Amino acid sequence: FQVYMAGLQGQRPSLPVDPEALEQAANRAMTPEASGYLNGMADSMRANLAAFQRWRIVPRMLRNVAERDLSIQLFNKRYPVPILLAPIGVQSIVHTEAETGAARAAASVGLPFIFSTASSTPLEQVAQAMGDAPRWFQLYWSKDPEFNQSIVQRAERAGCEAIVVTLDTYLLAWRPSDIQNAYLPFILGQGIGNYLSDPAFRKGLSQPPEVNPQEAIQRFLAIFTNPSLTWQDLATLRQQTKLPILLKGILHPDDARKAIDAGMDGVIVSNHGGRQVEGAIASLDALPAISEAVRGEVPILLDSGIRRASDVLKAIALGAQAVLLGRPYIWALALNGEQGVRELLANLLADLDLTLALSGCTSFAEVDASAVVRM
Ligand code: FNR
């Protein structure tokens, strides 16, 4: 009601409330290069959105939903809602407040913010802006073991509660608009904020990166192109940290089983927002089989295509414990910085509360496969 009643004082939202309108407004506000970078591959993204369309919610009536609890439990901790902010690199390309603005907005409502390895802002700086609000760290596994160890230790010191290892980006995919716009050198320059501050990264340079940014970018590319990784490599990380480790980019049920066998604590079903494999299976389409294979042994999270509260409910009905929100918070950041992201999240949480209630449920524990049907 707070959101509706703001209209009484003549207050109107500063951002479009409808996700499609928000996307269009953000695309107009960003540079064409940034908007091309955000969009990635057209076909895989359409598949993600279409998959959410095919599943429909079947609301139940007269179930007394006056008292509702939106919180969930993950790794022995309660979070206010089943939503985290996805790790997204180089946020400085859309707004000067960048990761710090987005993380502060997440902190204001207690949603975990996942720091990206490719952050334009050093993670310590983002962490400091968040007080003691929850945060996780996303690791791109580099060829440099010393750097990997160093950045994981930095994440631990900065209070991160879990490590997300993104598996699907050991090579950067074919992204037509970035090639057309010759945008990659600029992106790389923006995305090394986390590295420039890292002693292990600096050690591999002949000159300080402030003097020779070209060399820093070359080294970044050299250590992050890492296609020889295998399941055996996970043992190293398992020994390096006691934090829960989740693998992001899982799309096959056998890979989900392998994650559990490798001692991992969770999986994130994701096709990287349709940005890595054109023609890839939609993450929502991959979820039911993965949920069956995992048999409740570890939490399953999902991203790629979450745009509104009903998408969250559908993912939970099909076996996810929580979801990651990606581009929508970047669109809000592009339009209005931290304030924009605050507004987006406030609306999303209000929508989530209503969607849960109007579906006839009082908590996400009640949301199971019977809440949805595939058309
Ligand atoms: C990403 N994503 C991503 N993932 C990751 O693990 N590390 C990263 O640095 C980035 N960077 C990044 C940049 C941009 C511009 C986008 C759009 C995405 C992927 C991200 O975490 C998530 O998987 C998707 O964004 C989810 O899909 P939606 O919600 O954007 O459709």
Image: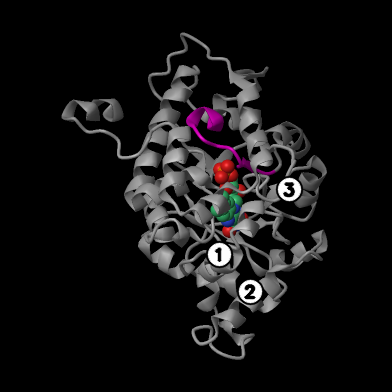
Q: Is residue 244 visible?
A: no
For the residues marked 3 and 1, what is the alpha-carbon distance in whole angstroms? 20 Å
Q: Is mark 3 within 8 Å of ligand 1?
A: no
Say what amino acid the circle numbered 1 marks: Ile
**Residue extending farthest left:** 9
User: Residue at left 24%, top 26%?
Assistant: 5
The residue tagged 2 is 220
Give the labeled residue for mark 3: 277
Q: Is residue 356 left or right of residue 350?
A: right
Q: How is the image coloured?
A: one colour
Marks 3 and 2, how far apart in space?
22 Å
Per the rendered image, the range of residues in magenta is 298-312
Which quadrant: the N terminus? Answer: top left
Q: Is residue 306 magenta?
A: yes
The stretch drawn in magenta includes residue 135: no
Residue 205 percent location from the top left of the image: 61, 86
The answer to which of 326 and 158 lies nearer the viewer is 326
Q: Residue furthest bottom?
A: 206
Q: Residue furthest front?
A: 180
Label 2 vs label 1: CA separation?
A: 12 Å
Whether tag 3 and tag 1 are in contact, CB under 8 A, the answer is: no
**Residue 279 location in percent, x, y?**
75, 41
Please tell me which residue lies in front, 128 or 65. Answer: 128
Q: Earlier in the sequence, mark 2 or mark 1?
A: 1
Q: Say what amino acid the circle numbered 3 marks.
A: Val
Image disc number at residue 187: 1
The x, y position of residue 309, in whole percent, is: 49, 31
SS class of the residue under badge 2?
helix
